[in-house]
Image (cartoon, rainbow, N blue to C red):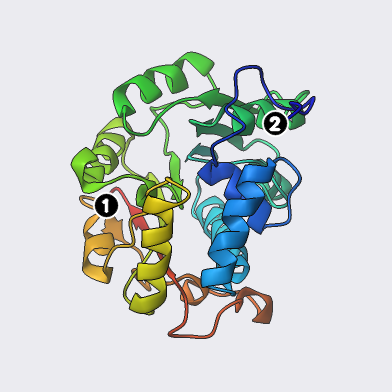
Amino acid sequence: MKRPAWAPEGVDMDRPSPARMYDALLGGSHNFEVDRQAAEAGKTLVPDLPRLALSNRAFLRRAVRFLVDSGVRQFLDIGSGIPTAGNVHEVAQTIDPECRVLYADIDPVAVAHARAILQGNDRAAAIEADLREPEALLVRARETGIIDFNQPVGVLLIAVLHLMSDDYTPIDKVNALFDAVPAGSYVAISHLTSATRPDDAAKLVENSHNVSKIGLQFRARDEITALFGKWEPIDPGVVELPMWRPESDRDQHEAPGRSLGLAGVGRKA
């Protein structure tokens, strides 16, 4: 398979990537055939999977607007994925052009594409970094100069913690981020859940471990709530994706009780 011009050298084009599969579900163009096949396999098992992806993006946009309204002017988006419509910097800088955004992802395609679209934007950047190594990620974040860790930070963990098994103790990674930011900072988390549709969740888990090999972790509601650790929950707490502060009917991509994702926002007092 010929490597597309936008793909960095050395990218494994024979193995699906969560970021590129997500891009495929959203109708993006920065993915490979193996990613599209994996996304289609997921849709065969759960046909409304694209709605979940759209609902997750809608939550991200609402959370960013809420944080800007709450006074946050800088964002650390970890596991940011491949940039598509309604990116964090677009949402935040539309409200206040002074907002700063640092994207971090383990996927080199995601990072390369982010850097390409951020050219000329001196208040946004992208780094290749791994949430499983939060200390190294934070060092790289500080080196960019984009984030001032003496001022409140909006930490975004959107659809990333469910890529981490319990062996990596994801709560420890969230707590490490909590310790790195000052009071007045926020965290936004979205996560796949087995709480609403356990049978569909089980199908996707089996497929992700045995076919696509990306290893999704669908967690129960109390497990996802526990991931907020020391962050104080913001009303309405951890709820289904479309139920977190919907702004219009367009946010209702999924009917109540049908979402495969839960989400919430927490604050460091």
Residue 209 x %, y % = 37, 51
> Is 126 placed above or below 27 here?
above
Pointer 2: residues within 10 angstroms few (<14), some, or many (20+)?
A: some
Residue 169 x %, y % = 20, 42
Front one among 224 and 193: 193
Q: Secondary structure at mark 1?
A: loop
Q: Secondary structure at mark 2?
A: helix
What residue is at 62 percent from the left and 64 percent from the top?
54
Q: Residue furthest top?
A: 143
Question: Number of callouts in the render?
Answer: 2
Identity of the amino acid at label 1? Trp
Residue 156 x %, y % = 46, 46
Residue 92 in view: no
Q: Residue furthest bottom?
A: 256
Q: Alpha carbon of mark 1 to alpha carbon of mark 2: how far? A: 32 Å
Front one among 214 and 251: 214
Front one among 18 and 81: 18
What residue is at 35 percent from the left and 20 percent from the top?
136
Which is nearer the N-term, disc 1 or disc 2?
2
> Is 83 placed above or below 209 here?
above
Front one among 267 and 114: 114
The label on residue 208 is: none
Residue 236 x %, y % = 38, 73
Which residue was labeled with disc 1? 231
Which residue was labeled with disc 2? 113
Identity of the amino acid at label 2? His
In the drawing, does residue 254 fall left or right of residue 172?
right
Pointer 1: residues within 10 angstroms few (<14), some, or many (20+)?
A: some
- Name the image quarter holding residue 246: bottom right
What residue is at 51 percent from the left and 24 percent from the top?
128
- Name the image quarter holding residue 251: bottom right
